[in-house]
Amino acid sequence: MPGGLAGYQIYVSRNDSAYALVATVDSSTLIYNYTSFNNGDSVQIAVVAFNSDTTILASSNYERFIATVIKPPAYIYLTSLSVDTSDNHVDIRWLVDNNAKIYEYQVYNSEDSATWATIPDANNGVEQVPVPVARFASYIDSTVQPQYGPYYYYVQGYDSCMTSTNTPPGEIVSLQGTLSDYYQITLTWNYFELYGATVQRYDLFRDIGNGSGLVFDKSFGPNVITCIDSVFQDTASIGQFCYLIQAAYTLNLPLANNYDTSEISLSNITCVDHRPIIYIPNAFVYNGVNNFFKPRIIFGDPAGYSMSIFDRYGGKIFETHDVNGAWDGTRNGSPVDQGGYAYLITFTALDGTPVTRSGIVMFLKK
């Protein structure tokens, strides 16, 4: 260019308006970012090169396009973290600014809220977002075991420029149960955590194995995360007691168009097997009030039950495999001599523990 290339002028026409000079750059600049347009605008651009005294101009071709604005979400919030008790998975649900342009979501979990991992799935961990963007989205995490401890979650939303927006993290409720004493089960759980959530109460549900399933038992305040459950009144059950905690909470998110609702979050189901309690009489009287020998087994759901009675020489004089079977003090239909007789009781408890009891029972005659 005679006189030397001095620079470039950038001209823009928006929505078929007259061209306007929007910038002048030096001769070494070959890139310019223009941002003064709205989503859906018709934009036409041309570049003009000029020499040092602007007497010589050279115009480029004209480039025309419809502008698409990549708008990141103003917010993404978790709204629900709950254990699906049918398969022990965690159901995750979140609320998003659906005026944004989102390309994909990524869900993260953690056992300690410090080390986070992406959740893999058939799409290599990526949840593609439908167009237009739905206000609510959800995901099911099948990689965790909430019965062993709480899990933390957050969701990351990406636009097509790979700019990310994160939800604040949340924490599910994990319930643990231990047999702390005879007829006494101690239950503990963690606080339910979710941004914008206020826990109103924790509801305890229990299943005593009578076929009724999980039944509401009692409620606790939002600051209570442990209780002791007495099973003394449930001695007719097989001895397995299962529990679930439900966190009832309100959710208020002013920045999300004042989103306000009530929700519940379920914990995992935890089951505790009560060890067998065995009462064995030390004597009985032929034709008396207590006229047979039979242990009373509370809990345990005995399997492979056997009770044998032996005389003083070690000979077996009675045997039953019926947990309700009893020895009436006879052998072959005739009463045995008064005295002490050895017994051996064996079975397998509900939790798989082998149980053996042996001793001497006194047989008395009036």
Image (cartoon, rainbow, N blue to C red):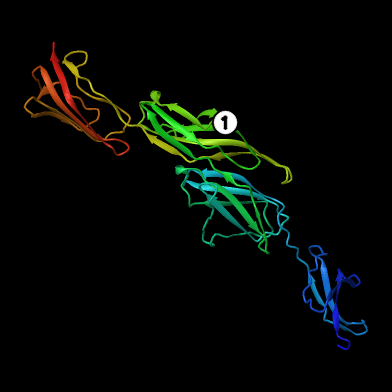
Give the quarter of the figure containing the N terminus: bottom right
Estimate the x, y position of residue 249 in percent, counting from the top left: 61, 36
The answer to whether residue 274 is seen in the rendering is yes
Check disc 1 and report its element: helix, strand or loop.
Answer: loop
**Mark 1 lies on residue:** 223
Q: Quadrant of residue 275 in the image?
A: top left
**x 52%, y 59%: residue:** 121
Locate residue 143 relative to residue 337 in the image: left or right.
Answer: right
| Count of numbered badges drawn on the protein | 1
Q: Quadrant of residue 328 in the image?
A: top left
Q: Amino acid at mark 1?
A: Asn
Give 337 or 177, whichever is nearer the viewer.
177
The answer to whether residue 48 is seen in the rendering is no
Q: Is residue 104 above or below residue 296?
A: below
Estimate the x, y position of residue 293 in percent, counting from the top left: 19, 22
Estimate the x, y position of residue 139 in percent, counting from the top left: 57, 52
Farthest residue in the top direction? 366
**x 63%, y 47%: residue:** 168
Q: Quadrant of residue 70 in the image?
A: bottom right
Q: Is residue 23 above or below residue 137?
A: below
Q: Is residue 71 above or below residue 183?
A: below
Give 13 or 300, whichever is nearer the viewer.
13
Locate residue 76 relative to residue 88 in the image: left or right.
Answer: right
Estimate the x, y position of residue 327 in percent, counting from the top left: 17, 24
For the residue carrying disc 1, how many other residues have a C-alpha within 10 Å: few (<14), some (14-19), or many (20+)? few
